[in-house]
Amino acid sequence: MQSFPKPLTAPQEACYLEQYKNGDTNAKNILIERNLRLVAHIVKKYTGSGRETDELISVGIIGLVKAVNTYNFDKGSRLATYAARCIDNELLMLMRGDRKLAREVSLYDPIGTDKEGNEINLFNIIEYSKDDVVEQMERRRYLKQLAVILPKVLTPREYQVIVKRYGLYGHKETTQRELAAQLGISRSYVSRIEKKALQKLKTHLH
């Protein structure tokens, strides 16, 4: 897969978003270019779908452009958080149209809200900017909250699936197919367990 420019730091992103808000189209192009690495990261989920990587990246870029065009500057969350969902949704629509890949529960599906009412998901908790101290503090808070909630609200099997699927607490991130092989069950059963577990988390994580 080709290499992409490094992502913007939080201050850089805020600066370019302000410029774009004021009509600077060059700032828009920079926001797109510097988030291409995010597209490549999400595309990795869809390898083995029967589509060429270049095609998946092209579709992902469409989602990224839509995200930059519709991003709410005053919302408060990082552009990458919003863009990740838009990119994922664009790729999912491609897969649905093909009927070659069933939709898996996504890292970007909301499981709760933060203090400002913004949706949060496992991507927000697992992925964060090392340059942003506030994001690091928030991440630690959510991880602590998850550590308490997960064993309380999930069954042992659900806990095992969530922790391994999303690489929590030192575990390596695992695909549904890999996890199914480890547990000796079908991939569709892993998907059902995962979806049920995330539904439980939605009602307890805040």
Image (tube, rainbow, N blue to C red):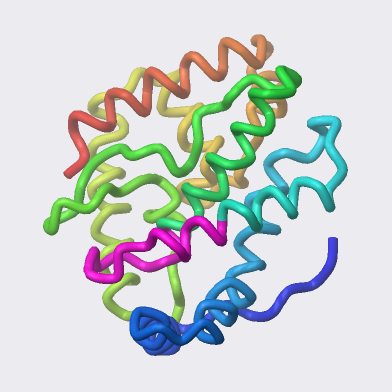
Q: Quadrant of residue 175?
A: top right
In-front residue for pair 196/89: 89
Q: Quadrant of the N terminus?
A: bottom right
Relative placement, left or right, of 118 versus 186 is: left
Please provide percent x and percent y for residue 74.
Answer: 22, 69
Which residue is depicted at the point 58% across and 70% down? Answer: 35
Q: How many marks?
A: 0
Image position of 40 with respect to 44: above or below: below
Name the image quarter holding the C terminus.
top left
| 182 or 138, nearer to the observer | 138
- Residue drawn at (47%, 84%) of the image: 9
Q: Is residue 66 magenta?
A: yes
Residue at 40 percent of width and 37 percent of height: 109
Q: Which residues are magenta?
A: 64-81
The image shows residue 136 at horizontal and vertical percentages of: 34, 71
Among the 4 quarters of the image, the one containing residue 150:
top left
Q: Within the magenta stretch, is there residue 100?
A: no
Relative to 15, 193 lies left or right: right
- Whether 161 is drawn above or below 91: the answer is above
106 relative position to 113: left or right:
right
